[in-house]
Image (cartoon, rainbow, N blue to C red):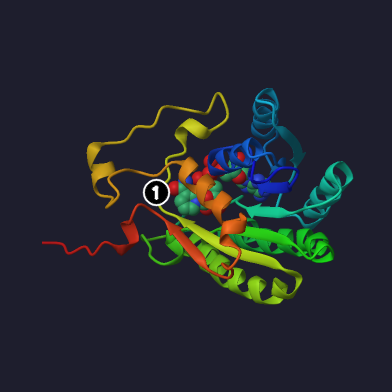
Amino acid sequence: MRFDGKTVIVTGGGQGIGRAVSRAFASEGANVVIADVDPEAGLENQEYIRSNNGEAFFVETDVSSEDSIKNLVQATLKRYKTIDILINNAGISKFGNMFESDSALWDKVIAVNLRGPYLCAKYASETMAKNNNGCIVNIASTRAFMSEPDTEAYSASKGGIIALTHSLAVSLGKYKIRVNSISPGWIEISEWQKSGKAAPAVLSEMDHLQHPAGRVGSPLDIAKACLFLCSDEAGFITGTNLTVDGGMTIKMIYHE
Ligand SMILES: NC(=O)c1ccc[n+]([C@@H]2O[C@H](COP(=O)([O-])OP(=O)(O)OC[C@H]3O[C@@H](n4cnc5c(N)ncnc54)[C@H](O)[C@@H]3O)[C@@H](O)[C@H]2O)c1
């Protein structure tokens, strides 16, 4: 039980990667705060963790709202008295051709994916700084480093997360707060959605085989990386990015 009694906030903890991350911390003894804009998903995950003898608490949160983030931090402190770990996972994958989409798409993606993690870090780390102890993991993406067409806002938001991570690590180091990011590659989330939305993964052999690791990723791969980065084993790791993509971004591709 590496995280016995520790309080962990997981934004976007209701579904997908955040669902696996919150369950992983709960199974290691943590008090898990599921901060999600979707109450159905968040309450369902809270119920799952509780029925598996874990400690979980859902707080309806929209990370694009500063007031909502302040409320999340207050509700967490009211229930658990402290905050030890923040996993900035909530994000939206909205893509669009820049000639056909207006600036609202850009503003929305940046508000959720970049401003949200910054503000969550700002308010959660006030308590961590008082404790002289803490850990933040920001979920970026391999799209911070490489792109498909029409992904400007999303890629920029994730590139921003990489820079935000090293900046926070330097600012918060004096309070013994470590800050790192994880860049997931292709993570198959269909089976990790709320009931009603969850579906079996439909993946071809080629989907798996194009990865040097031989398979598409699972939310569990990201959960394990979060546990590692927040554990004592990672005590000398801060300001860095861990790419968890089965090797896709180191593959050289030539078209015939
Ligand atoms: N799945 C992948 O292949 C992949 C790859 C790289 C990076 N990521 C990143 O991983 C993170 C999780 O994505 P996922 O694939 O699990 O997606 P998902 O859609 O399954 O889960 C995202 C969760 O965040 C919540 N959310 C959305 N907007 C929110 C807001 N404003 N405030 C609070 N919660 C909000 C959603 O309700 C949902 O529960 C995101 O940051 C995403 O960019 C995912």
**Residue 251: x %, y % from top left:** 26, 61
The CB of the residue at mark 1 lies under 8 Å from ligand 1: yes
For residue 229, above or below residue 12 = below
Report the side of 18 relative to 59 (left or right).
left
How would you rate the neighbour count of disc 1 (Cα within 10 Å): few for under 14, some for 14-19, many for 20 or more?
many
* In the foreground, 220 or 66: 220
- Name the residue carrying label 1: 186
Residue 170 in sight from this viewpoint? yes
**Residue 235: x %, y % from top left:** 61, 64
* In the foreground, 183 or 8: 8
**Residue 52: x %, y % from top left:** 65, 25
Q: Residue at x 71, y 48 (%)?
A: 9
For residue 38, above or below residue 200 = below
**Residue 65: x %, y % from top left:** 75, 54
* In the foreground, 98 or 75: 75
Q: Quadrant of residue 22?
A: top right
Q: Secondary structure at mark 1?
A: loop
Q: Residue at x 66, y 30 (%)?
A: 49
Q: Residue at x 51, y 46 (%)?
A: 224
Kind of residue at badge 1: Trp
